[in-house]
Amino acid sequence: MKFTIKILPAFIFILASCTPVVIQTQPTITPTASNTPTATPPPLIHSIEELINLDDVLSLEEVSSTVAENDEAAYTYAFTYLSQGNIVEGYIAAPKDYLEQPNPYPILIYNRGGNADLGAVQPFVPSYFAIPLKAIVFASQYRETFNGTGKDEFGGDDVQDVIKLLDFAERCTFADSNKIVMLGGSRGSIMTYEVLRMDDRVRAAIIAGGVPDLASVYHFREGGSMQSILIERVGGTPEEVPEEYERRSAIQWADEIHVPLLIFHTADDDRAPIEPVDRFISLLETLNKDVTYIRFDEGGHGYLDLDLIQEFFAVHTK
């Protein structure tokens, strides 16, 4: 077990029946290599430009990250894809030397906070991480964002929008799908925890300003618009649909998380209270989970330390 709590200065980054047997006298056909049906595997792709060749990718376009320094060091592409029949927007970014590496770069899946258009991934974010981490970065806007279709369920079926990125990553020969780390901020922590519960392709995860207990956020944000958002997107209040809040609350099924975690939170977070995070950390410790907890005294919602993320990412993508 690894359990560490550190207090550090903040770095800001906004977030048989008895039926008679009838014996047939027809000849038996033995399957051979020529007559045995086989499923055609999805194609492998060898560059970001080939992402468009995947069946569920609808469009792909190189874009500016909006930060000149980032554009000099990394490529950023916007793409749209299908997830459960819904159109979803996303980004992929990579250091410009990604095709020159003897070994493919590891992968970071970035899970944004917010809902629908609010808190959407900005173009600079994927390259912000791709450059220092030397990683291929995927990010989903989730369904119902901008030109996306379907309904943002705040950690419901929309988790499949993130899992779809893992499927794409497995087809990329220029990215090492055996070395995937996930980073979730705020609501993105819910998506991250749920993926960890459902899919074993992620090696480790980083959480910033996270939500291990969604009901606590509902009550903490009493009187604000967040309660209305949760009622709409989750389907009701914690008292009306407790099973939906439990589904989105890792504190209810912490024993099902089996990868190392790096968790950042601030004591003065006014959007995601720290008390449930402290309880979650205690539970993870009791369960002998591998967790490093960076607890800031102040700084607000979504603070993290990029240097510590680099160290954690390097260790878990060796």
Image (cartoon, rainbow, N blue to C red):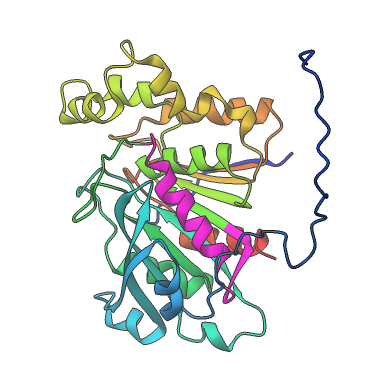
- Left or right of 221, for residue 77: right
Q: Where is residue 228 in the image (x, y as percent from the top left)?
A: 18, 26
The reply, left or right, for residue 224 in relation to residue 12 is left
Asked whether residue 167 is drawn in magenta, I would say yes
**Number of callouts:** 0
Which of the pair 184/88 is nearer the observer?
88
Front residue (pair 228, 260):
228
Residue at (29% x, 48% y) in the render? 143
Image quarter where the C terminus lies is: bottom right
Above or below, comparing residue 82 to residue 265 in the picture: below
Q: Which residue is drawn at 39% across and 59% down?
A: 139
Q: In this view, does 81 lie to the left or right of 45?
A: left
- Is residue 186 among what the camera can see? no
Pick the front one: 155 or 150: 150
Residue 85 position within the rendered picture, expressed as x and y whole percent measured from the top left? 34, 48
- Say if 201 sits above or below 51 in the image: above
Residue at the spot 57% in from the left edge and 25% down from the top edge: 253
The magenta stretch spans which residues?
A: 155-180
Q: Position of residue 175 (x, y in %)?
A: 57, 71
Q: Where is residue 58 in the image (x, y as percent from the top left)?
A: 32, 66
Residue furthest toward the top? 239
- On the rendered image, what quadrant is the N terminus found in? top right
**Residue lying at the far front of the rendered structure:** 25
Membership of 189 in magenta stretch:
no
**Residue 219 in view (yes/no):** yes
